[in-house]
Image (tube, rainbow, N blue to C red):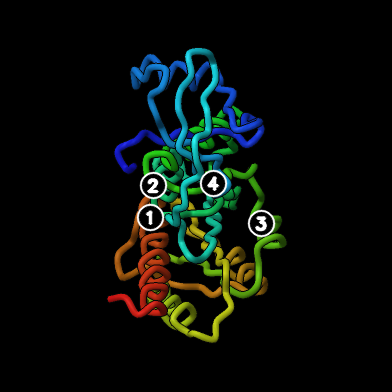
Amino acid sequence: MTQLQRLAVSPNQIEANRIQLTDRQQHYLGRVLRLQAGDRFIAMDGTGHWWLAALRKDSEADLLESIAAQTELPIAVTLLIALPKTGMDDIVRQTTELGVSQIVPVLSARSLLNPSPQKLDRWQRIAQEAAEQSERQIVPAILPPHRWKEALQQWQGAGCYLCEARGDRLHLLSCLQRELSNHASTLSALTLAIGPEGGWTETEVQEAIEAGYQPVSLGARILRAVTAPIVALALVGAVAEANELAKTGQP
């Protein structure tokens, strides 16, 4: 069924094995994809459930059968991202493709933006589209902006990593291999904090350390604020999924 189009729907659109399609979804299925009554697609509710669905003549679709799938990372990843000057659309899209669970825009000392509700709505739509394209089971949530101290109060302790551009820090890859490859580890979620252009201030770094964050490096090169979260998520995905394969004895 990989050739079928994915469509993310809200759980409240589903009632009695039928989907009530929005005007936007009807336009997409009928005008953009040119599906007709009886044509099939895959519906996903953004919380982990997939169904084979068939379009009806009206503004509805029938749920034909549930589909078992596992496309999510074996560990939930929260991304605290200090808002960059540009490129947030790409960060949302590409980290969604890589498996992020939720994205928290952070207003740090060097952040220049304070996004409007319209921006947050746009980022959520981008996450939904990226989840459909990459065959995710969930649609990552884009949370409202948090100030740095507020974010640290909510996401702190074990499994929290602060990515820094400079300084003699352990590489994130080494930390992940040590943590996730430990069969005794019960870590089911981790948090990545990525700074803005110019990096975190010394005060912010110290506040993170006091909240239990491990400062880490992403390598010897200085990465753009848009590139760093992609690298960090790719490392998490590679280590976490390789570890899961090793547990099952697969190469």
Q: Please tell me whether mark 3 or mark 1 is closer to you in this view.
A: 1
Report the amino acid beneath label 2: Gln
Q: Please tell me whether mark 4 or mark 3 is closer to you in this view.
A: 4
Q: Along the polypeptide, which appears first: circle 3 or circle 2?
A: 2
- Residue hosting label 1: 230
**SS type, badge 1:** helix
Question: CA gap, disc 3 to disc 1?
Answer: 20 Å
Between 150 and 49, which is closer to the camera in this rendering?
49
**SS type, badge 3:** helix
Q: Is residue 105 left or right of residue 196?
A: right
Are discs 3 and 2 less than 8 Å apart at CB? no
Report the amino acid beneath label 1: Ile
Question: CA gap, disc 1 to disc 4?
Answer: 26 Å
**SS type, badge 4:** loop
- Residue hosting label 2: 94
Residue 29 vertical placement versus 240 (above, below): above
* Residue at figure coordinates x 37%, y 45% from the top left: 134
